[in-house]
Amino acid sequence: MLSYQEQLSNATRSQMEATLALMTNLTTRTFEGVEKFIELNLTVAKTSLEESTAAVQQLLAAKDPQSFFSLTTAQAQPNAEKALAYGRHLATIASSLQAEFTKATEAQIADANHKVVALVEEISKNAPAGSENAVAFLKSAIGNASAGYEQLSKSAKQAVEAMEGNIASATAQMTQAAAKASGRSAKK
């Protein structure tokens, strides 16, 4: 049978290894998210440069002010739609990264909580007489910490859902505004 110190030492070592694995996983996911963000921005920059060059050439080829303004107006809606698509893609990257972080963290916390509860149960079985109050206090503290984490987790999920809803709403409003603007310019 292991002594309390050996049990705590093993539990601490196991927890440190799990925390290191979690941090490595989160760091890897962060780099993957940054890579996606950089790739998106490079693609947008390259495409934007090509499209801007073509647009300027079209504008320079305009024969009169009327055709110049028609071309300018015609380019407004596609640019607004591209900006919206960029925002949606960026939000998708951020949302995906956040979901992966949440999933990994929740799994780590659940595993750690399970190990702590098991350790407390093992120690309480062999606790000397008269330590029942201390063991009960420890169990209560673990239960309160778990309940606090669950509430924090729920609040974080609600905040993410609200943010995603706000992004979707803003995207819809911007799409409608771009459609109205292009509709007005087509009537002129």
Image (spheres, helix red, strand yellow):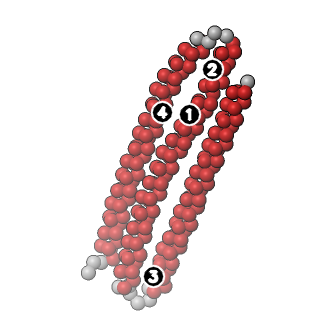
Q: Nearer the viewer, mark 4 or mark 2?
A: 2
Q: Position of residue 67 (x, y in %)?
A: 66, 15
Mark 4: few/some/many CA within 10 Å (<14, 14-19, 20+): some
Q: Amino acid at mark 3?
A: Val
Of residues 51 and 36, which is closer to you in this image?
51
Q: Earlier in the sequence, mark 4 or mark 1?
A: 4
Q: Nearer the viewer, mark 1 or mark 3?
A: 1
Q: Earlier in the sequence, mark 4 or mark 2?
A: 4
Q: Amino acid at mark 4?
A: Asn
The residue under the point 37% across, 76% down is 119
Question: Could you tell me how far apart the alpha carbons at marks 1 and 3 are, in whole angstroms?
Answer: 61 Å
Q: Earlier in the sequence, mark 1 or mark 3?
A: 1
Seen as rendered, the residue at the extreme bottom is: 129
Asked if marks 3 and 2 touch (Cβ < 8 Å), the reply is: no
State whether residue 134 appears in this view: no
Q: Which residue position holds label 2?
A: 71
Question: Could you tell me how far apart the alpha carbons at marks 4 and 1 are, in whole angstroms?
Answer: 13 Å
Q: Which residue position holds label 3?
A: 135
Look at the image and tell me in which quarter the C terminus lies.
top right
- Tell me, for residue 16, which label it has, or none: none
Q: Which residue position holds label 1?
A: 82
Q: Which residue position holds label 4?
A: 41
Location of residue 135 (image quadrant): bottom left
The residue under the point 67% across, 40% down is 176
Q: Amino acid at mark 2?
A: Leu
Q: Nearer the viewer, mark 4 or mark 1?
A: 1
Label 1 residue SS = helix
Location of residue 131 (image quadrant): bottom left
Q: Nearer the viewer, mark 3 or mark 2?
A: 2
Q: How many marks?
A: 4
Q: Amino acid at mark 1?
A: Lys
